[in-house]
Every structure is written in structure tokens, then in C-alpha cells.
Amino acid sequence: CAIANVAIEGIPPAELSRRLLADFRLWTVPIDRPAAGVQGARITPHVFTTKAELDQLVAALNRIAAS
């Protein structure tokens, strides 16, 4: 498994997580801790997560960033 934090400039973490779930059915956890320098959506793929599922996440992030 792994853990990552992704952000899109200008989109608050809660909004990014909301859009990933509403538009792409991707569950993430918003992390908004500016004092700790961590802001974004926490991504936690599992050992069973496929490359195709990771490609889906990347495509979703690209679509949100382009909007």
C-alpha cells in the first residue's frame, strides 16, 4: 500500500475531495493543515489497486485541474 497527498492550486482540499467523489466516484480524505504544510486530498491505494484504477485517478485530477 501507499499514501500520497495531492492538491490542485486554487481548489481547497474539501472541494477537491468532494468533486472526486461526486464526479468520479473516487473516495479521498481532505487534509487541510496549513500549519503543518499539508493541504490536499489523501490518496491511499491498496495492494489490490490496479494500474487502471490509478490511471482513472490521474485522469480525474487532470480533468478537475483543466476546469
Image (cartoon, grey):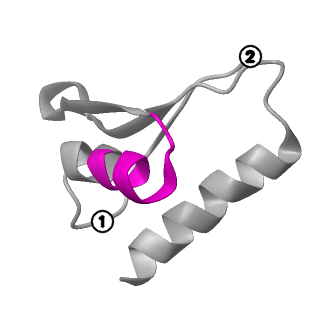
On the picture, is 54 further left or further right than 65?
right
Q: Amino acid at mark 1?
A: Glu
Residue 41 placed where, x, y %?
Answer: 38, 39
Magenta stretch encompasses residue 24: yes
Residue 67 placed where, x, y %?
Answer: 35, 83
- Dot 2 alpha-carbon crowd within 10 angstroms: few under 14, some 14 to 19, many 20 or more: few
Q: How many marks?
A: 2
Residue appearing at x 50%, y 55% in the figure: 24
Q: Secondary structure at mark 2?
A: loop
Q: Is residue 15 above or below residue 3?
A: below
Q: Main secondary structure of the magenta part?
A: helix
Q: Residue furthest left?
A: 35
Q: Is residue 14 above or below residue 31?
A: below
Which residue was labeled with disc 2?
A: 1
Q: Is residue 31 above or below residue 11?
A: above
Which residue was labeled with disc 1?
A: 9
Q: Amino acid at mark 2?
A: Cys
Quarter location, residue 46: top right
Residue appearing at x 19%, y 52% in the figure: 12
Q: Secondary structure at mark 1?
A: loop
Span colored in magenta: 18-27
Earlier sequence position, callout 1 versus callout 2:
2
Q: Quadrant of the N terminus?
A: top right
Q: Which mark is residue 25?
A: none
- Dot 1 alpha-carbon crowd within 10 angstroms: few under 14, some 14 to 19, many 20 or more: few
Between marks 1 and 2, how big is the CA–CA gap?
Answer: 26 Å
Residue 5 placed where, x, y %?
Answer: 47, 37
Residue 53 placed where, x, y %?
Answer: 75, 45
On the picture, is 24 further left or further right than 55?
left
Magenta stretch encompasses residue 38: no
